[in-house]
């Protein structure tokens, strides 16, 4: 447990009505009283600082000059943000003034807080778990009311409760399996029944984590926009589609293949859905030879890997080429379920049919468009909408059940989900229980990591390093 006293500016730096300097740790009051004098001249000044009441007074420097007129609040532990003694100084909101106050505190024995250190202490002192700590990041960065609501729910412990329940259930299942491993039942029927019941229980947990994943996917779309990458070989009309979506001629469009080299990114809104739309450099085998094209193509590949949705464009007047197939086989196979295939330029030719798309790309929803004549584009937008809502018609119901998570949390849930799915599939195939136990244990440990138990110091540093100083 940390035990020095830290101080930081807790309001944004810059001019403001007030600025708050926060001190936390065992010496908070002692240090504050070295620079603060209440207006009332009481000999034992700390009694003027009635806990959780504001006290009016002044901050003085070493030479007894008044630095500012302030209100100060002393909050003794343990019922504070950090569970330590906290003092907050409400000063005027000026950058130099607040820095002066902070420097005075440091000269009297406080240490400048690291980013997120107040919240880290709240976590280390057991006031909140890691899910709640990270939800504070989500609250600060929420950019819509729904995102804020979800982050508040997480801070209030709803998600933590759900994860705790999963951990308890996994522990129960594990101990039941482990207890039964040495025990060979005489009654085969009995054994089959027990096994079947266990499988049902693992499946129920997997069902919950499936839902958590779906909700967090929605949360991220709401928060960041659906990362939608336009890809295809050179000259098929990627930049033209990008320009159509953003409603202006931003990307350079020419009849020469290899026009786009950089990634272009813009936030747009289609049918109420936030999209982060990305135009990429055309991909083709020979491009590897040109050093500039190669860099552009590498950007494209990375964008594809990170995409939530890939718009794969073909040239309808040209047909499906070997290059298209090469792109699909090399870069898009992993994105098979996040793929919309588009045939552009149907104004000058239309020789691609659904059957070919079916056979070659195992995809059944070719969208035919002409950006030049603006045909088929509404159908494309409908398809994107359908992809996002996956069958749900109402934006409201979509927004109701979402979860705004930090990337680390999303990642852990999806990893745990994989191990649980493995376990429940393996149980279906009657794979020996001692192997299944391994997957279940890993899943349980991932959930423990999620709430911050048995977590490594460097992971903690990484998490709290994402906070601002003073939080
Ligand atoms: N006839 C016709 N031409 C189109 C259509 N869409 C785009 N084009 C033309 O196709 C050419 C290439 O368009 P771009 O949008 O630059 O293609 P790109 O895929 O971005 O190409 P790179 O950046 O080189 O990979 C331009 O001359 C466009 O005017 C269309 O629907 N019909
Ligand atoms: Mg382009």
Image (cartoon, grey):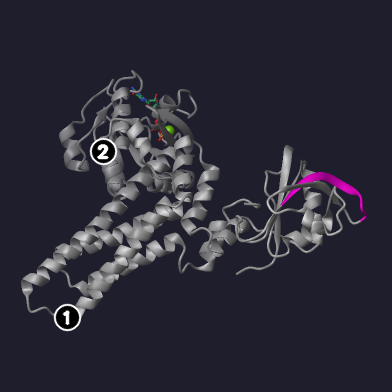
Badge 1 crowding class, 10 Å Cα cut-off, few under 14, some 14 to 19, many 20 or more, is few
The one of 222 and 91 positioned closer to us in this rendering: 91
For the residues bearing labels 1 and 2, Cβ distance under 8 angstroms: no
Q: Residue at the spot x=29%, y=62% of the render?
A: 419
Task: Describe the element under mark 1 as helix, strand or loop.
Answer: loop
User: Dividing the image into 4 quarters, which one contains the N terminus?
Assistant: bottom right
Looking at the picture, how far across and down is residue 282, in whole percent? 39, 38
Residue mark closest to the camera, 1 vs 2: 1
Q: Earlier in the sequence, mark 1 or mark 2?
A: 1
Marks 1 and 2, how far apart in space? 61 Å
Looking at the picture, how far across and down is residue 95, in whole percent? 77, 43
User: Image height check: is 253 above or below 131?
Assistant: above
Q: Which residue is mark 2?
A: 321
Looking at the picture, how far across and down is residue 65, in whole percent? 91, 50
Q: Residue at the spot x=46%, y=55% of the render?
A: 131
Query: Can residue 224 be seen?
Result: no
Looking at the picture, how far across and down is residue 311, in whole percent? 34, 36
| Residue 52 painted magenta | no
Badge 2 crowding class, 10 Å Cα cut-off, few under 14, some 14 to 19, many 20 or more, is few
User: Image height check: is 120 above or below 350?
Assistant: below
The one of 188 and 223 positioned closer to us in this rendering: 188
Query: Can residue 37 be seen?
Result: yes
Q: Which residue is mark 1?
A: 183
Q: Which residues are magenta?
A: 63-73
Left or right: 335, with 261 as reference point: left
The one of 78 and 301 positioned closer to us in this rendering: 78
Instruction: Locate residue 140: give its quadrant.
Output: top right
Left or right: 196, with 274 as reference point: left
Left or right: 38, with 344 as reference point: right
Task: Describe the element under mark 2 as helix, strand or loop.
Answer: loop
* Ligand 1 image-quadrant field: top left
Determine the main secondary structure of the stretch shown in magenta.
Answer: strand
């Amino acid at each position: 447990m940390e035990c020095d006293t830290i101080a930081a500016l807790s309001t944004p730096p810059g001019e403001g009505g007030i600025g708050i300097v926060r001190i936390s740790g065992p010496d908070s009051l002692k240090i504050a009283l070295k620079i603060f004098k209440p207006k009332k001249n009481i000999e034992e000044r700390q009694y003027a600082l009635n806990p959780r009441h504001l006290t009016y007074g002044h901050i003085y420097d070493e030479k007894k000059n008044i630095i500012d007129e302030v209100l100060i609040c002393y909050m003794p532990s343990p019922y504070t943000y950090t569970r330590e003694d906290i003092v907050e100084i409400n000063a005027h909101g000026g950058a130099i003034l607040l820095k002066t106050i902070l420097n005075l505190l440091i000269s009297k024995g406080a240490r400048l807080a690291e980013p997120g250190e107040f919240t880290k202490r709240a976590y280390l002192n057991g006031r909140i778990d890691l899910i709640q700590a990270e939800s504070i990041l989500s609250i600060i960065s929420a950019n819509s009311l729904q995102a804020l609501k979800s982050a508040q729910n997480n801070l209030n412990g709803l998600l933590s409760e759900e994860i705790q329940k999963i951990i308890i259930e996994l522990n129960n299942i594990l101990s039941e399996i482990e207890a039964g491993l040495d025990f060979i039942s005489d009654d085969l029927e009995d054994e089959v029944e027990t096994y079947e019941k266990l499988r049902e229980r693992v499946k129920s947990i997997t069902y919950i984590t499936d839902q958590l994943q779906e909700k967090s996917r929605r949360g991220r779309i709401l928060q960041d926009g659906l990362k939608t990458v336009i890809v295809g070989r050179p000259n098929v009309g990627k930049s033209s589609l990008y320009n159509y979506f953003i409603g202006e001629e931003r990307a350079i469009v020419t009849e020469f293949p290899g026009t786009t080299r950089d990634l272009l990114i813009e936030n747009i809104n289609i049918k109420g859905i936030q999209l982060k739309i990305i135009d990429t450099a055309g991909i083709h085998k020979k491009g590897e030879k040109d050093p500039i094209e190669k860099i552009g193509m590498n950007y494209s590949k990375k964008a594809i890997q990170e995409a939530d949705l890939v718009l794969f464009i073909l040239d309808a007047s040209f047909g499906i080429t070997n290059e298209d197939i090469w792109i699909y086989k090399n870069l898009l196979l992993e994105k098979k379920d996040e793929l919309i295939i588009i045939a552009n330029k149907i104004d000058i030719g239309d020789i691609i049919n659904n059957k070919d798309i079916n056979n070659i790309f195992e995809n059944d929803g070719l969208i035919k468009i002409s950006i030049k004549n603006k045909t088929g584009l509404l159908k494309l937008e409908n398809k994107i909408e359908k992809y996002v809502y996956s069958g749900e018609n109402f934006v409201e119901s979509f927004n109701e059940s979402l979860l705004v998570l930090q990337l680390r949390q999303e990642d852990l849930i999806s990893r745990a989900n994989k191990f649980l799915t493995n376990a429940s599939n393996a149980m279906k195939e009657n794979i020996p229980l001692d192997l299944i136990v391994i997957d279940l244990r890993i899943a349980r440990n991932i959930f423990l990591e999620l709430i911050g138990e048995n977590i490594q110091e460097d992971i903690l540093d990484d998490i709290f390093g994402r906070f601002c100083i003073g939080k």
